[in-house]
Amino acid sequence: MIKYRYIVAVLLTLFFCSSCQGGSELYVNIPEASKKIQGETIGTVVKNNETESAYEDNNNTSPISFWDDKPVSFANRDTTTDGKYLYSFNQERNYKVDLSTGRVSSVCQVPGCPHIRSAYGCLDFVNFQCPVATNKGIYYTDGRKVMLLGGEKSECVYENKYYTDLDKKILPDDPDSIHSLAVQNKKLYMIGTTFALCMDLESGDVSEPVDLSETTIYAFCANDDYCYYTDQYNEFFCYDPKERQIKKLYDDVTFCRAYEDRIFFIKYEAGIPILYSISGPDAAPEKVIEDCYVFCAITNGYVYYQHYAQADDYDIYMYDLGTHETDVVVLDHERYNEEGDRIPYNRNKKYVISYSSMIDHIFICDADQEVVFAIKAGETEYKAIELDLK
Ligand SMILES: [Zn+2]
């Protein structure tokens, strides 16, 4: 077990300027703080061009995608990153963190907007559901609309009108709502209560809707061949689009993720969540991690997770899918309090561990304590970005 020794702590003191005119840089950070982080770049910035294939980052490590290959899960519902910014969308306020400087700023870029809750159309207060970053911008849902946030504006790219009698029964007022988005291999899956549609992100073509479930769809992922999903009873299914057939695979599953050529899923056995992987719907499952809390991240060849059954264990573990070795990350950190004193960071909690295929880092966003921890996949050292969002 390796404990990290290296911490870069950044204090960002931000002033929300409620009367700024037209500027996109609404936050002022203390020059000293920006000096501290200079030269420190968190993650690899994805170049904004339309090159077809994924490219290698400067260190020739894992390829970075132009698309956040993102499944639907409870985790990862509120954050996304395009490699340049980490976006955090929550009910209090939406913000983004510049990953090369640590500066926090407004998501809203509408010219002249004062960025206050009462300002009509201010994107800092729009309820973004299931944001997914791509090199075109951030897709999110708003009722039955699928939106794309790019540059100064947010536009509707698809408006769903499809629903079944069952959707009407489950959600009488909004049967046609799109609840979640998943992206895999340049396809955007739009998930309703019981149905799914698929948009080709390059051509914009949208498939016919498919009725997948007799109850509400909870988790969802897809690869080139199949769609996998769970329902509200934690039943795990596979849909074969070629045969137009649904097959039930397992019970007690709460998480699924298509990663490289395998499907990972968490199945509860005697109250313990176990991470398995399969190569296809008919393949035998392989056990990957015993006691893997559902808010885990699988990215760049690693699984970052916490334990669940061991309730008083709050460390974050890093499992190497290649070597099968496990290391530990300890968020043994001090942060500034309101008086400017350093106080111990309270790490005794279970986290949502967030990731994006567009960047080789995972993020632990702790809105309660206003700290974001960034960890490069494959490492156990963290960089802490302290936020002042008041
Ligand atoms: Zn605004």
Image (spheres, helix red, strand yellow):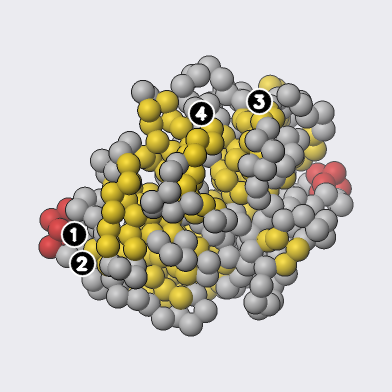
Quickly name the residue at label 3: 345
Q: How crowded is mark 1: few (under 14 residues within 10 Å), some or many (20 or more)?
A: many
Quickly name the residue at label 1: 167
Looking at the picture, how far across and down is residue 301, in whole percent? 65, 47
Question: Image quadrant of residue 345?
Answer: top right
Amino acid type at circle 4 is Glu
* CB-based contact (under 8 Å), mark 2 and mark 1: yes
In the rendered structure, the answer to whether residue 203 lies left or right of residue 213 reads right
Amino acid type at circle 3 is Tyr
User: In which quadrant of the rendered image does the C terminus lie?
Assistant: top right
Q: Nearer the viewer, residue 238 or 134?
A: 238
Query: What distance separates the C-alpha of mark 2 from that of mark 3?
Result: 47 Å
In the rendered structure, the answer to whether residue 259 lies left or right of residue 378 reads left
User: In which quadrant of the rendered image does the N terminus lie?
Assistant: top right
In this view, the mark in front (2 or 3):
2
* CB-based contact (under 8 Å), mark 3 and mark 1: no
